[in-house]
Structure formats: structure tokens, C-alpha cells
Image: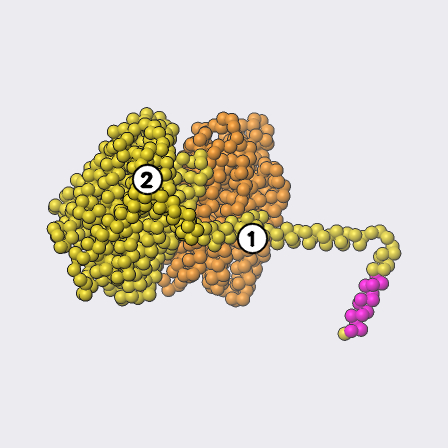
């Protein structure tokens, strides 16, 4: 019931905001804030309640489920369920949601009702994606998050918004269709095999598929997730979409939408096609490394701050792809950490970019410089998140990248060595951000205000989170553990349930 | 928490937090109290715990304290655990004690700066990170400290951020050390998969069973760790960042780029000595890197104008001696030289800072001169530091520590006559550039007017450091006179004893030669810069020598080399690909579609003749195909 409630809160909140917007311009933001905070609190209490209970069992690891019949004749049910992994991602979704509302507070003045409607419906779509246990329902939510995002970029974006919105839509939609075909293929194969036609995830996971076919079906899923993640060479929609989207749009894109790609691989690609996934492991890891290096190189040359941060996302998501296909517990835990910490650190950088743009009315870093003098607080926070971006120990991103590299090292030596060079490149581009924006002689005259109280709250929440994850990541690791261990078992059926893997020679 | 060990790093951290969050609301006095006070307290606690450890320490001579579990995943377990043994005690003592003196000095030195609290916040964070580095019981926690000091070094080199050159120097330092750090991280992965742990004590215990002597994997691990050490300690080939790092305030150079952070590599190698002992190749590489660096840096120091750059190259060269000692297996000698060097080099940097400050930020030694009588405290303390650096026999502590290294470079297990000869030549050069620096700065006629004299907060730390630079050597006297081995006895609880080669002749001959080298160097410096300065002018006229001098002056062309083979290609590649070539693929698809659309839409012209023509051509093509088949 709680799971359905989460979706209902967001969708109903969105509709109310739409209606209230006709009446008063500032009502919608309050409605959006209240509904996202309500969802966040529900989840937080649930997590605190559960986190002692989360344990590795041989059974499915669902913490809570909700099931209702939907379209029985096609075997479609409204089935939601979460395990530790989805719980973490849901908490993240609502956390990012609150921040998205807060950072739109002053920025959005036009058509606020429709804006917050879109924002909440994206969140609903993302939350649904993280909970859906029926492939048809999953695809439904997948589309729900796409269309409002298209409007968000297309209406409230900056100069080149229409082009960016189109590009975003076409990339995601085309790849989504391939996934839908693959879902249908799986549906019919399972139906032929057993006589039961169903979209249920639990039923479909056991489907026996001829390996030739399995590769193609997996590719259908993979392409959709690879575009979202994004994997080089499907990344080119990302800088445009990020660059043109309003701040909250970039925040949700980086913090949540990219993560649905990673989640999809963990939840669907590996469990549905473990054998096929194993076959593409090495090429996938190579693509991951290509993303790490290529994204970093591109990031270095950018002059548009938001495009730069977008390319750093490409680089960081390369770590995720590499970690997923390293297929061991260390790397997969690293992936979970990377999903969470990247949302926080990159989200923070996008919010900072938005704050700077509000003050200077530009995203061009060549026009910035010496901002530290007038805005020491903004500078300090910028420094913290630049450091998170380059993986400084003590901040969450380090744990993520360290675990991924450590796990990947076990899987493939040379790929990991090349990937580790990403640590150097990330230092190069992160320090360039700091230098260009905050340091050097002051450019441009006039008084620029430092953080307002609202901005302080946003950045404090993000800073506390990234430091907490860097120094005491164990709650996240423990929560994700059952799901991660299950994945490892799927890939290595002979490994022990308790998974204290012995790496020692 | 009955053991106050955790307080040692916690106090500077608390200082950092206070200054970072409340620094803008505090008065300068309060800022100095928080910043310097926290480190002074740390130093006191260190002395307290240290005495207890040495007098009534537990079995095994180690205090250990686990604070919490940091990461625990699938058999990989890293805890936040602090460990204090004899080796880390020496480092903790140097960090907190010299750190406290430098903080007190800074309270006066930075008085006029508008970012007073930011300075102390960064310094406190540095002390905290450095303490974590040396107190860590496992390599991952050490890596946290390792990167933390890198961050603080970056922040403090670029402290005066309005000048883009300082920012460049800061980024250069961070990036180059990061290259070493990345290699070190790969080394950590290998250690973990080989031994199943990153806890130093466990690795030390397991190593002899895990690996055979000179096994390839051990050599690779040792070299990867060495790469990390080489980056942080500014040794060849990652040394180019250190001279530029002098862009930071002088107390920063004293604390970070002379006394503590740059010796992290020495600590790492000493801490992981078991791994290095297992690989003859890695050991020799350490020794060769040390020898090459000490020579190259020494020659470069001979040609510099900027007093801080002379000291920077001299630091590089002295750490080269420490690496040389580690490489030949003289573990305790390396740590001893580290400690002595920390005293006299911090002293030299602080004194140089006082001079620079008094001369309106004049760095060029050729525009100083005649300060001997005008700044007596600075002169005498600088002289003591310089005597130690030049290793003046018997009276200076630098003699005792460097002489030991020279002797072991020949006599220890890994030593050889060639290494010894290089070290001896290095000693000669060291004495020469030190004398040159002394003469240019303090003798001759005064060339720049003195602004204001350093206050008490600056001179007292100088005097204390000068005292230690004089006496620190006496806790370890050579075997042939005194034979007082307090320091090495302490170290041997952690580090192995130095093994001597069997066929070595008596030690006193080497001491005599070392002394001669020092006096020779001093004479050369005096001859060319004090007695007959016109000879230097004559040498400058010589075309070939001028070329050599330019080569040395540039630091042997390493910057230019890296610029050509690394920086320029990187910038070039990123610049030409700014618009992302992959995106061209997709825009290409769009253009092709667009072109096709225009082409085909042109066929729908509404003209009957074209349609008939089209049908006829179509018919001919179809018929043609049919006839062919």
C-alpha cells in the first residue's frame, strides 16, 4: 500500500499543482514541496525501521509489495515491490525531488502550475520505474518520466531548448521502442514455453531462451538503458539536454534519469539474461572505460559550465557500466554507491551552475573568474563538490570509485588500469572548473550576493550527505547487500550465499 | 576512549571545523588561538603519549585504537584505526611539534592578510590529514590522509588566488602528484588481491610466506607504491611541481613542502619496508632515483636566483638522500635524516620568509645582501640551519645524519661505490649552493631597504628550531666515536637493522672524505661569490657554460619535456574535439535524411514530361535487369 501511495502522492500532487497554478502563482511550489517531502519522510521512516531487518536470504528479497490486477487478458498486473536497492533509489528520488523543488523556487516564474505538474510527474515516473515488477508497467512508467521531461526542457529551458528537447525525446523514445520490442519478444517466448502469457517480472526471470535469441533480446533492453546511462557512443543527447534544461531539469536528469539506466541493467538485463550478459561483459567493460576517458577529455575542453558537468557525468557513468559488468560484489556495491553519490555531487554542481547563472546571467566560464572574493561560501561549496567529482577520499564518490575499481581489478586487470587513469583526468577537469570560476582575478564589476538562506539549506543538505557517505557508507552498503549478493549468485551460481568471497590467492 | 590517541588528529580537525564554519565571525586573535592552539595541544598530547609509549609501552611497542568500521564489503574490510609505533611517533612528533612552531610563526607572518581564517583552516586541515596519513593502520586510511594532504597543498599553494600563476602552480602540484597516487592505488589493489588485507601489520606479518624473494609481483607492487612516493616526495621523474609550489606563503613551504608532506614518500617506503626488502630490483630503483634526484636538484640549486627556489631544490635533493638511504637498506638513517632535515629546512624556510617579508616580497637573492648586521636573529638562525644543510662536521646535526647516509651508500647491503661517489659529489654541491645563498643574502652591500622587522611570534620559533637543528644530531652518534644509538635503537623496534657488506673498510675514512667534501663546497662557494666575484662573471661569458647554466636553471628541461610530450598533445586533442566528433555521426544522419527529403521532394514537380520520362527510365531499367538475369 505504501508503494502505491508514493506514486499517488506525486501524481495527485502534480494535478493539484496544475489546478492551483491557475489560481495563484506560488501555490504550486508549496504543493510540490509538501508532496515530495511527505514521500521522503514516509520512505525515511520505512528505511530506519527496516535497516536492521535487511538481511541476505536465499529467497526473493522484497521488503514490501503491492499487487492489483490490471489488464488480465494480457497478463498485465499492477505489481510494485522493492528490495534494498530500490529502497535506496526511492529515497534518493524523493531527496532529489525536494531539492529540485527548492532550486526552482525563484527560478521558475512562468506557468508555475504546469511546471510543477511536470516535475512531480517525472518523479512519479522515476519512482514507478524503481518499483515496477511488471514489464508492461515498467515500460509505462518509463514513458511517464520521458514526456514531462520533454516539456520541462522545451518550455523552461534556455536559448536552444527546442533542439535539445527534440534530441532528448528522439534518443530516448527510439531506444525505448527497442526495449518494448524486446519485452514483447520475451512475453511471447515465455508464453510459448509455458502456455502462460504474462508480463510479470518474477515469472519471466526464469524463462529459458535460446542463447542466440537471448543476445538479441538483451540488446533491446541494453540499448534503452545504454542511451539513458549514457554509454559512449549514445551520449550526445546528454550535453544538449543538460545544457539547455532549467536547473531542476538538469538536477533530475543527472540525479535520477541517468540512474534508471543503471537500475535497468541491474534489475532486468542481468537477472533476465545472465548468460547473455556474461558474453558481453568484456566489450561492455571496454565501453565503460571508453566513457570514462572520452567523457573526461570532452569535459576538459568545454567552456559552457553545464555542458562541462554533463560530460563529467558521461565519465562517471562509465564507472557504473564497468562496475556492473565486472560481476562481483565489490564492484556492484561500488555501482550502488556511485549511483547515489553521483546524484549528490553532480546534482550539486548543476545547482551551483544554476545559482551562478542566476547571478551572472551566463554559463560561459570564460566570462567568470575570481568569484571567491565576493562569494566565499559558494566558492567553498564549489570546491567541496569539485573534490567529490575528482574522487577525494573522505567524500562519498571516493568509496564508489574505489570499490568499482577494486572489483573491476578482479575481473580484468588492464581495463582497470586504463580506467584508473580516469582519476587523473577527473583531477584535471575538476581543478579547471575551480580555477576558471572561483579563482584568478575578479572579472566584471558589481555586487554579487552570496548564498541566500534557501540556497544554504540546499547545499548544506548535499554537503552533509556527501561527507556522511564518504566516512560512514555502511548503512547504504548494508541496505543494498541482499540485492547485490543475489545478482552475484545469478552470475556465479556456485558462489556461497554469504558471499564472503575469497580473493586471496 | 581511555586512550587519548584519537585526540592528536581530532584537535586540528576541530580547529579546522571551527575556522571553516565560524571563521568569518571570529577576531584575528581568536582565529590564531584556534588555529595555532589546536596544533600546540596536539603536540603536547603527542609528547605525553610518546613518553608513555617509550617508557611503559605495551608489548610490541604499539598503541592502537579503532574508531569505527569504514567500509565492509564482501571480505574487504577497512577500519578507521589509528596506530602509534616508534616510526609513526617520530613522524607525529615532527608534524605536531614543528607544525605548532610554524603555526605560531604564521600568526605573525599572516597578520596583515585578509584571509587569515582561511589560511589557518587549511593549515589545520593539513595537519589533520598528515596525522591521519602517518597514524593509519591500513593503507586505505593512509590513502585518505595521502590525498587529504594533496588537497591542502593545492589549497595553500594557490592561497593567493587572485594571481593565476599561483593557481597554475597549485594545479600542477595536484595533478602531478595525482599521477603517482593513481599508480599507488593500483598498487593497493594488487596488495589486497595478493594478501587479502590492507592492514599494514598483517601485510608485514604475511609477506615472507606470501612471496618469494624477487618474485615479479612483489617488484611490481613495490614499484607502484614507489610511484606514489615519488610523486609526493618530488623525486624523479615527478619532481617538477615542487619548485613552482613555492608560490604559496612561506610557512606553507616550511610545513608542507619541506618538513612533512614531501617526506610522505619516505614514510610510505619505510612503512612498507617488507615489500621493498623482497625485491632487489625495486630497492635499487629507489636508490638510483634518490641518487639521480639529489644530483640533478643540487646542480639546479646552484643556478637559482629566487631564495625559495634554492631551498625547494635543496629539499628535493635532501629527500633524494633519504631515498638513497632507503634504497640501500639503511632504513633508520633515512628516518633520522628526515627528522633532522625537518628541523633545519623548516628553519631555513621560515627565516627566508622573514627576510622576504622584510624586503617587501623580494625573492631574488641578488637584490638582497648585507642583512648580516641588520637582521641578527634571522642571520644567526639561518646560519645554523645552513650549517646543518651543508653538513658542517661535528657541530651541525645535518652532519650526523648525512654522514651516516654517505657511509651506508658504500657500506650497506645495497650500497655501491658509484652511489657513494654520487652522494659525495652531492654533499660538495650542497655545501657550495648553501654558501652561495648565505653570501648573497647576508654579506656584501645592502641592495633593498628593510621594511619592518619580524616580531616575537616569528623570531621565537626560529630560535627554537635553531636549537633543535644544533642538538638533534647528538641522539645518534657514529659507531667510531661516541657510539650513541638512541635513535636507531628506537627505530629498530619497527625497522630492520642495516646490514653491512662484508668487505668494507673502516668508517673514519669516509667521514673524513665527507668532511672534506663539505669544506670543499664551502670553499668553492666562498671563492666564487665572496672572494672573487669577477670570476663568476668570466664564467658567464663563456658560451658553452652559459648554455649549461640555462639547462640547469630550467631544472634540466623536465618542464619543457613534459610540456611537449604530455601537456600540449592533451590540450590539442581536447581542443579539436570540443564539439564531440561522435555527435557528428548523429547530425550526419539528420543531414542525410534532410538531403534525401529535398531530393525526393524535387521529383514531385507537377510537370507531366518528367513523370513520363521517369516511367520510361524505370521501364528500361527493369527490362535491362530482366535481360541480364
- Magenta-highlighted stretch: main secondary structure? helix
Using the image, name the chain to which the residue with label 2 belongs: B
Residue numbers of the magenta segment:
B615-628
Q: How is the image coloured?
A: by chain
For the residues tagged 1 and 2, is the chain the same? no
The answer, for residue A422, to whether it is visible in the render is no
- Disc 1 vs disc 2: which is toward the camera? 2
> Contact, CB < 8 Å: mark 1 with mark 2?
no
Colour of chain B as rendered: yellow
Q: Using a 10 Å C-alpha cutoff, classify the residue at mark 2 as few (fewer than 14 neighbours), some (14 to 19) or many (20 or more).
A: many
Q: Where residue B301 is drawn, which disc sits there? A: none
Lateral position of residue A136 relative to residue A458, left or right: right
Above or below, A129 against A219 in this view is: above
Per the image, label 1 sits on a secondary structure element best described as loop
Q: Residue furthest right?
A: B609
Q: Position of residue A155 (x, y in %)?
A: 61, 37
The residue located at (41%, 50%) in the rendering is B542
SS category of the residue bearing label 2: helix
Quadrant of residue B437 in the image?
top left
Q: Callout 1: 10 Å neighbours few (<14), some, many (20+)?
A: some
Disc number placed over residue A234 in the picture, else none: 1
Read off the chain for label 1: A
Q: Which residue is mark 2?
A: B440
What residue do we see at 42% from left, 43% from top?
Answer: B169
Q: Which chain is orange?
A: A
Name the spot of residue A495 as percent of width and height, x first: 36, 62
Q: Is residue B34 left or right of residue A357?
A: left
Relative image position of residue A349 (x, y in whole percent): 47, 40
Q: Which quadrant of the rendered structure holds the N terminus of chain A?
A: top left
Amino acid at each position: 500500500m505504501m508503494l502505491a501511495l508514493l506514486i499517488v502522492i506525486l501524481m495527485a500532487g502534480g494535478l493539484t499543482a496544475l489546478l492551483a497554478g491557475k489560481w495563484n502563482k506560488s501555490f504550486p511550489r508549496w504543493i510540490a514541496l509538501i508532496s515530495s517531502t511527505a514521500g521522503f519522510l514516509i520512505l525515511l521512516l520505512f528505511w530506519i525501521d527496516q535497516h536492521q531487518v535487511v538481511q541476505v536470504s536465499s529467497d526473493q528479497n522484497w521488503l514490501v509489495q503491492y499487487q492489483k490486477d490490471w489488464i488480465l487478458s494480457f497478463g498485465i498486473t499492477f505489481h510494485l515491490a522493492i528490495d534494498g536497492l530500490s529502497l535506496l533509489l526511492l529515497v534518493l528520488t524523493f531527496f532529489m525531488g525536494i531539492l529540485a523543488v527548492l532550486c526552482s523556487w525563484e527560478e521558475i516564474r512562468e506557468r508555475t502550475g504546469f511546471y510543477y505538474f511536470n516535475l512531480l510527474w517525472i518523479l512519479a515516473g522515476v519512482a514507478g520505474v524503481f518499483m515496477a515488477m511488471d514489464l508492461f508497467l515498467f515500460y509505462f512508467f518509463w514513458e511517464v518520466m520521458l514526456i514531462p521531461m520533454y516539456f520541462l526542457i522545451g518550455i523552461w529551458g534556455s536559448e536552444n531548448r527546442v533542439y535539445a528537447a527534440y534530441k532528448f525525446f528522439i534518443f530516448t523514445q527510439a531506444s525505448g521502442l527497442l526495449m518494448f520490442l524486446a519485452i514483447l519478444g520475451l512475453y511471447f517466448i515465455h508464453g510459448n514455453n509455458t502456455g502462460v502469457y504474462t508480463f510479470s517480472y518474477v515469472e519471466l526471470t526464469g524463462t529459458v531462451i535460446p542463447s542466440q535469441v537471448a543476445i538479441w533480446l538483451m540488446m533491446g533492453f541494453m540499448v534503452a538503458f545504454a542511451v539513458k546511462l549514457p554509454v559512449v557512443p549514445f551520449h550526445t543527447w546528454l550535453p544538449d539536454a543538460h545544457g539547455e534544461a532549467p536547473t531542476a531539469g538538469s538536477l533530475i536528469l543527472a540525479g535520477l534519469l541517468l540512474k534508471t539506466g543503471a537500475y535497468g541493467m541491474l534489475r532486468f538485463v542481468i537477472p533476465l539474461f545472465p548468460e547473455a550478459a556474461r558474453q558481453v561483459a568484456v566489450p561492455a567493460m571496454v565501453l565503460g572505460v571508453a566513457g570514462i576517458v572520452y567523457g573526461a577529455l570532452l569535459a576538459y575542453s568545454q567552456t559552457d559550465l553545464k555542458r562541462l558537468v554533463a560530460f563529467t557525468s558521461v565519465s562517471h557513468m562509465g564507472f557504473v557500466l564497468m562496475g556492473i559488468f565486472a560481476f562481483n560484489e565489490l564492484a556492484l556495491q561500488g555501482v550502488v554507491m556511485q549511483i547515489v553519490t553521483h546524484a549528490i555531487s553532480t546534482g550539486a554542481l548543476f545547482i551551483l551552475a544554476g545559482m551562478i547563472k542566476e547571478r551572472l546571467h551566463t554559463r560561459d566560464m570564460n566570462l567568470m573568474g575570481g568569484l571567491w572574493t565576493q562569494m566565499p561560501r559558494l566558492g567553498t561549496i564549489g570546491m567541496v563538490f569539485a573534490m567529490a567529482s575528482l574522487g577525494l577520499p573522505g567524500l562519498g564518490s571516493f568509496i564508489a570509485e574505489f570499490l568499482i575499481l577494486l572489483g573491476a581489478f578482479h575481473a580484468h586487470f588492464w581495463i582497470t588500469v586504463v580506467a584508473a587513469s580516469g582519476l587523473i583526468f577527473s583531477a584535471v577537469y575538476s581543478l579547471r572548473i575551480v580555477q576558471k570560476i572561483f579563482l584568478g582575478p575578479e572579472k566584471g564589476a558589481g555586487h554579487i550576493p552570496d548564498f541566500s538562506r534557501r540556497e544554504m539549506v540546499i547545499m548544506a543538505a548535499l554537503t552533509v550527505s556527501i561527507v556522511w557517505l564518504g566516512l560512514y557508507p555502511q548503512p547504504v552498503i548494508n541496505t543494498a547487500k541482499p540485492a547485490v549478493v543475489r545478482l552475484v549468485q545469478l552470475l556465479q551460481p556456485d558462489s556461497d550465499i554469504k558471499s564472503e568471497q575469497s580473493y586471496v590467492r | 576512549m581511555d586512550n587519548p590517541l584519537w585526540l592528536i588528529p581530532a584537535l586540528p580537525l576541530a580547529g579546522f571545523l571551527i575556522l571553516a564554519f565560524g571563521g568569518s565571525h571570529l577576531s584575528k586573535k581568536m582565529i590564531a588561538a584556534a588555529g595555532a592552539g589546536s596544533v600546540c595541544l596536539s603536540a603536547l598530547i603527542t609528547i605525553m603519549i610518546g613518553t608513555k609509549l617509550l617508557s611503559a609501552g605495551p608489548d610490541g611497542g604499539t598503541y592502537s585504537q579503532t574508531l569505527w568500521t569504514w567500509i565492509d564489503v564482501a571480505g574487504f574490510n577497512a577500519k578507521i584505526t589509528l596506530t602509534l609505533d616508534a616510526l609513526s611517533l617520530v613522524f607525529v612528533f615532527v608534524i605536531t611539534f614543528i607544525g605548532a612552531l610554524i603555526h605560531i610563526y604564521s600568526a605573525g607572518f599572516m597578520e596583515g592578510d585578509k584571509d587569515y581564517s582561511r589560511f589557518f583552516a587549511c593549515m589545520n586541515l593539513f595537519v589533520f590529514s598528515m596525522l591521519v596519513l602517518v597514524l593509519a593502520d591500513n593503507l586505505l586510511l593512509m590513502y585518505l590522509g595521502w590525498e587529504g594532504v594533496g588537497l591542502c597543498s593545492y589549497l595553500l599553494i594557490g592561497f593567493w588566488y587572485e594571481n593565476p600563476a599561483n593557481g597554475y602552480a597549485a594545479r600542477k602540484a595536484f595533478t602531478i602528484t595525482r599521477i603517482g597516487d593513481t599508480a599507488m592505488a593500483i598498487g593497493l589493489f594488487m596488495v589486497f588481491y595478493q594478501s587479502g588485507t590492507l592492514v599494514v601489520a598483517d601485510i608485514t606479518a604475511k609477506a615472507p610466506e606470501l612471496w618469494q624473494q624477487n618474485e615479479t609481483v612483489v617488484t611490481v607492487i613495490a614499484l607502484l607504491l614507489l610511484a606514489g612516493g615519488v610523486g609526493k616526495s618530488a623525486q624523479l621523474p615527478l619532481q617538477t611541481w615542487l619548485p613552482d609550489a613555492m608560490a604559496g606563503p612561506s610557512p606553507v613551504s616550511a610545513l608542507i613542502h619541506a618538513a612533512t608532506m614531501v617526506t610522505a614518500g619516505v614514510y610510505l617506503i619505510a612503512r612498507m619496508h617488507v615489500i621493498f626488502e623482497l625485491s632487489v630490483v625495486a630497492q635499487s630503483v629507489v636508490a638510483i632515483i634518490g641518487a639521480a634526484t639529489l644530483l640533478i636538484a643540487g646542480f639546479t640549486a646552484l643556478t637559482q636566483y629566487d631564495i625559495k627556489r634554492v631551498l625547494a631544490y635543496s629539499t628535493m635533493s635532501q629527500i633524494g638522500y633519504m631515498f638513497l638511504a632507503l634504497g640501500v637498506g639503511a632504513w633508520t638513517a633515512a628516518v633520522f635524516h628526515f627528522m633532522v632535515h625537518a628541523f633545519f629546512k623548516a628553519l631555513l624556510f621560515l627565516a627566508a620568509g622573514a627576510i622576504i617579508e622584510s624586503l617587501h616580497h623580494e625573492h631574488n637573492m641578488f637584490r638582497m645582501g648585507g642583512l648580516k648586521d641588520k637582521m641578527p636573529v634571522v642571520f644567526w638562525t639561518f646560519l645554523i640551519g645552513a650549517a646543518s644543510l651543508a653538513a658542517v662536521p661535528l657541530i651541525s646535526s645535518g652532519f650526523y645524519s648525512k654522514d651516516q647516509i654517505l657511509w651506508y651508500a658504500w657500506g650497506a647491503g645495497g650500497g655501491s661505490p658509484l652511489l657513494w661517489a654520487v652522494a659525495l659529489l652531492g654533499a660538495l654541491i650542497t655545501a657550495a649552493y648553501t654558501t652561495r645563498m648565505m653570501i648573497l643574502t647576508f654579506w656584501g652591500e645592502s641592495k633593498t631597504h628593510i621594511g619592518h622587522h619580524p616580531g616575537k611570534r616569528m623570531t621565537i620559533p626560529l630560535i627554537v628550531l635553531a636549537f633543535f637543528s644544533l642538538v638533534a644530531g647528538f641522539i645518534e652518534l657514529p659507531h667510531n666515536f661516541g657510539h650513541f644509538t638512541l635513535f636507531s635503537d628506537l627505530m629498530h623496534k619497527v625497522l630492520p637493522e642495516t646490514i653491512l657488506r662484508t668487505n668494507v673498510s673502516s668508517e673514519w675514512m669516509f667521514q673524513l672524505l665527507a668532511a672534506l667534501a663539505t669544506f670543499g663546497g664551502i670553499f668553492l662557494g666562498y671563492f666564487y661569490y665572496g672572494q672573487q666575484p669577477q670570476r663568476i662573471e668570466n664564467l658567464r661569458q663563456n658560451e658553452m657554460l652559459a648554455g649549461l647554466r640555462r639547462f640547469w636553471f630550467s631544472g634540466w628541461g623536465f618542464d619543457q619535456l613534459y610540456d611537449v610530450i604530455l601537456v600540449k598533445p592533451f590540450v590539442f586533442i581536447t581542443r579539436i574535439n570540443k564539439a564531440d566528433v561522435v555527435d557528428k555521426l548523429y547530425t550526419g544522419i539528420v543531414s542525410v535524411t534532410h538531403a534525401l527529403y529535398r531530393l525526393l521532394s524535387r521529383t514531385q514537380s507537377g510537370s507531366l514530361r518528367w513523370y513520363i520520362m521517369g516511367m520510361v527510365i524505370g521501364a528500361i531499367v527493369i527490362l535491362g535487369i530482366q535481360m541480364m538475369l
